[in-house]
Amino acid sequence: MMKNGEIIENQRLKGDYFKVRFYAPQICETARAGQFVHVRITPRGDRILRRPFSIYNCENDALEVVYKVVGGGTKELSELSPGNVCNLLGPLGVSFSDPLPGVIPVLVAGGYGAAATYLLTKQVSQRGIFLIGARSKSDVLLTDEYQKEKYEVRVATDDGSEGHCGFVTDLVAQLLKEKPDEKFFFYGCGPHPMLMALAKLLRANRQKGELSIDHLMCCGIGACFACVVKVKADTLPGWTFARACVDGPVFNLDSVYVE
């Protein structure tokens, strides 16, 4: 669905991280956790390609996106004020699935991957655990919001400036050691190396889950094949390519080709 979305609010969360709210009732009607919107920031000639953003939240007809300023497009987005309009294409992609009854959801995020898993807290009745890893305290996002949804929050930072000094996979390993008899379902989103490490750890411990693998997307509708990722296949050579924008970005843990 392609719709124009008027900006209601565009605020800095911390550092280079922002949250923008669009008035987009029709997209909000069907949006699910793990899906994304493809945003055309301006009609200028040097901004032809849309930018994909995970859907952070949908509330009162407002679609919320959390983003980091990393280039010209996101810098331009951060400078837009309420009343400005962006063209939105969405919701797109495969969403996360709900855990079975009696299973504890564990959301594992790297950096602003935290934005992709938050909507699960509104859609899944079970309360769970949120594990976030980041480079430093300044990159730890949305922990207060997860706590408001009654999720247990654990933090890891590379430099030890907040929480555990190390990787978010350390927190996963610790959780599995602490609660060996619990039934978990893991949801992961973050940098590719983190997701590969998480996949290896979960498979080694025979855990189930899903990973959001969001490679660079140009068209967002499966036409350009720019965002392909490796997944397992039943035929030789044992793997094939899938398009992250339409076959994903959410993939079952067991189908992910681990590098």
Image (cartoon, helix red, strand yellow):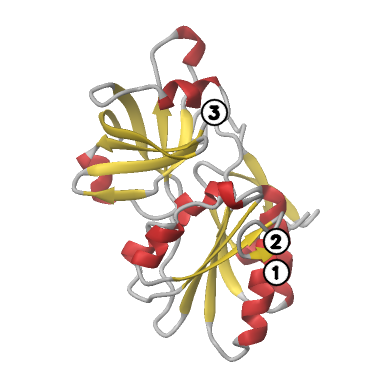
- Residue carrying label 2: 167
- Secondary structure of the residue carrying tag 3 is loop
- Secondary structure of the residue carrying tag 2 is loop
Residue 221 percent coordinates (x, y): 46, 35
Work out whether 243 lies above or below 196.
above
Looking at numbered disc 3 in the image, what kind of residue is underneath it?
Answer: Cys
Answer with mark 1 or mark 3, whichever residue precedes in sequence. Answer: 1
Q: Which mark is residue 67?
A: none
| Front of the two marks 1 and 3 | 1
Q: Residues within 10 Å of mark 2 (few under 14, many from 20)?
A: many
Q: Residue at x 27, y 21 (%)?
A: 84
Q: Residues within 10 Å of mark 3 (few under 14, many from 20)?
A: some
Q: Residue at x 39, y 46 (%)?
A: 55
- Residue carrying label 1: 170
Looking at numbered disc 2 in the image, what kind of residue is underneath it?
Answer: Phe
160 vs 99, nearest the viewer? 160
| Front of the two marks 3 and 2 | 2
The reply to whether dot 2 and dot 1 touch (C-beta < 8 Å) is yes
Q: CA distance from mark 1 to mark 3?
A: 34 Å
- Residue carrying label 3: 218
Residue 11 percent coordinates (x, y): 36, 35
Report the residue that reaches farthest toward the bottom. 181
Query: Can residue 248 be seen here?
Result: no
Residue 19 percent coordinates (x, y): 39, 39
Q: Residue at x 46, y 25 (%)?
A: 50
On the rendered image, what quadrant is the C terminus found in?
bottom right
Q: CA distance from mark 3 to mark 2?
A: 31 Å
Answer with mark 3 or mark 2, whichever residue precedes in sequence. Answer: 2
Looking at numbered disc 1 in the image, what kind of residue is underneath it?
Answer: Asp
Residue 145 sits in quarter: bottom left
150 vs 225, nearest the viewer? 150
